[in-house]
Image (tube, rainbow, N blue to C red):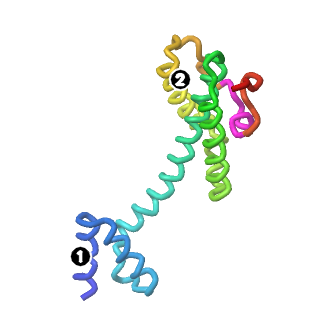
Amino acid sequence: MKTIELQILQSLYDQDFYAWVEQTAELLKSGNWETLDLENLIEEVVDLGKSQQRALQSALRLVLSHLLKWKYQPEKCSNSWQITITRERLNLDELLTESPSLQRFLNDADWINTTYQRARREAIVETGLAEDNFPIVCPFAVDEILDLDFYPHSKMEF
């Protein structure tokens, strides 16, 4: 009986993911361990961790690209840029508060560099400035990136 229920649950994973989630949650709540679709459940738990990392990287990339624009195209600084930088810094703070182990990514020079290179590319495209205007290596320390009051130049009046 359990094998048939497991097969049904496994096929539900491919056919109706949300229904699979609801059914899996019910099985977990009831302690019905034998019927759990462990293979897909493990995959989803791993994906949750990856999702947190992607959220961290996305927020960091946005902060970095806007700080680059702020620094290398100061004449175009806008309230919109400041709002984006502040919002994404707050998102970073929330992510790090909810999952302190994500901090290890901010201590990983290769991870920061990968994120910076993406932010740099965005800034190049958005500003229209030549690639050589932007440093190859991230010009901001992690503390500066996270600091709600840090801007590469003194705050401009809007």
Q: Secondary structure at mark 1?
A: helix
N-terminal of the pair, mark 1 or mark 2, is 1
Q: Position of residue 153 (x, y in %)?
A: 74, 22
| Residue 149 in the image: above or below residue 43 | above
Left or right of residue 119: residue 89 = right
Q: Magenta includes 145? A: yes
**Residue annotated with mark 2:** 123
Q: Position of residue 106 (x, y in %)?
A: 65, 42
Type of amino acid under label 1: Gln
Q: Position of residue 157 (x, y in %)?
A: 73, 25
Q: Residues within 10 Å of mark 2 (few under 14, many from 20)?
A: many
Residue 44 is drawn in which quadrant?
A: bottom left
Q: Main secondary structure of the magenta part?
A: helix
Q: Residue furthest front?
A: 158
Left or right of residue 151: residue 2 = left
Q: Which residues are magenta?
A: 139-146
Where the N terminus falls, by quadrant?
A: bottom left
Type of amino acid under label 2: Ala
Q: Are marks 1 and 2 in contact (CB under 8 Å)?
A: no
Residue 67 is drawn in which quadrant?
A: top right
- Residue at (39% x, 82% y) in the render: 27
Left or right of residue 82: residue 54 = left
- What is the tally of numbered marks visible in this picture? 2
| Residue 30 in the image: above or below residue 92 | below
Q: Secondary structure at mark 2?
A: helix
Left or right of residue 92: residue 52 = left
Q: Magenta includes 74? A: no
**Residue annotated with mark 1:** 7
- Residue at (63% x, 35% y) in the render: 109
